[in-house]
Image: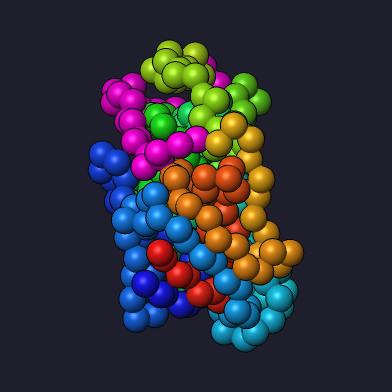
Amino acid sequence: MQYQGVLKKMESEMGRPIQYYMLFDNDFLNVNQVLDKELQIDFIKYQCLRCGEDLPIFRQGFCRNCFFETPLAGDWIMRPELSKAHLDKEDRDLEYEKKVQLQPHVVYLANSSSVKVGVTRKSQVPTRWIDQGAHEAILIAEVPNRYLAGITEVALKEHVSDKTNWRKMLTNEVDDEDLLAWRDRLKPYVPAETMEYFLDKGGEIHMDFPVLQYPEKVKSLNLSKTPSYKGKLKGIKGQYLIFEDSTVFNVRSNEGYYVSLGIS
């Protein structure tokens, strides 16, 4: 079985276990069906997700020029407290920024490698948690725009991490945490500006990833250095493919790479 196309973030669907899909222009692959099979990945060329040109990918699937031009890579994406659409101020494309920033956002706690605070659009729950490889998560607040979510996250990350240790996440060195207790503990640090949006109710949400075998140590596959790789797929967690030889492949960090996928 052969697939070919540009890599993009895997789509996911909540289930027991979570279902993963790779989408191509004229086809799609349910990645769960490849578990315990040999998967061959061959890098063919680059294809920038914005201009479509065969140019080296700089970040987030974009060539260098597109990365600094597209509104999909504005600073407010990674730092929501920099959002300005609620002030009617443009960063790169005000129409796009209003569409994304001026909608309900949530502040949450997720446990991927340890407890971390994060922000996402309400419409991205639980996708965001799945992408991070979190096995449990809980909502802290639901606010009307991205800026308010951002300032809440900034306040809370003084008291809890906002990073994921991807190696611990992939080796499953993760302890269960009482996220309700964490939420109560962090409540006093929620800014006055967003306290009215704090969520006292709602319990933990749990994610079940399709992993047959976790690696003891991980070695990351870089297609720029290793353009051809073959291995037996043993799991999918976050946006990573996990192979029997402990190789892991981050699909999202390889967006914009045009590849051939062979399954045997």
Nearer-the-camera pick, 262 or 171: 262
Tally the marks.
Answer: 0
In this picture, is 243 found above or below 40?
above
Q: Give the answer, above or below, for where 76 lies relative to 188.
A: below
Q: Residue at x 59, y 32 (%)?
A: 216
Q: Does residue 152 appear in the picture of this structure?
A: no
At 40% from the left edge and 29% from the top edge, which residue is drawn?
136
The residue drawn where x is 45% and y is 37% is: 213
Residue 191 on image: x %, y %: 54, 28
Q: Residue at x 69, y 64 (%)?
A: 226
Relative to 15, 134 lies left or right: right
Q: Main secondary structure of the magenta part?
A: loop
Q: Nearer the viewer, residue 233 or 240?
A: 233
> Which residues are the magenta region?
188-214
Q: Is residue 110 above or below residue 250?
A: above
Location of residue 180 in the rendering, given as x and y in whole percent from the top left corner: 39, 17
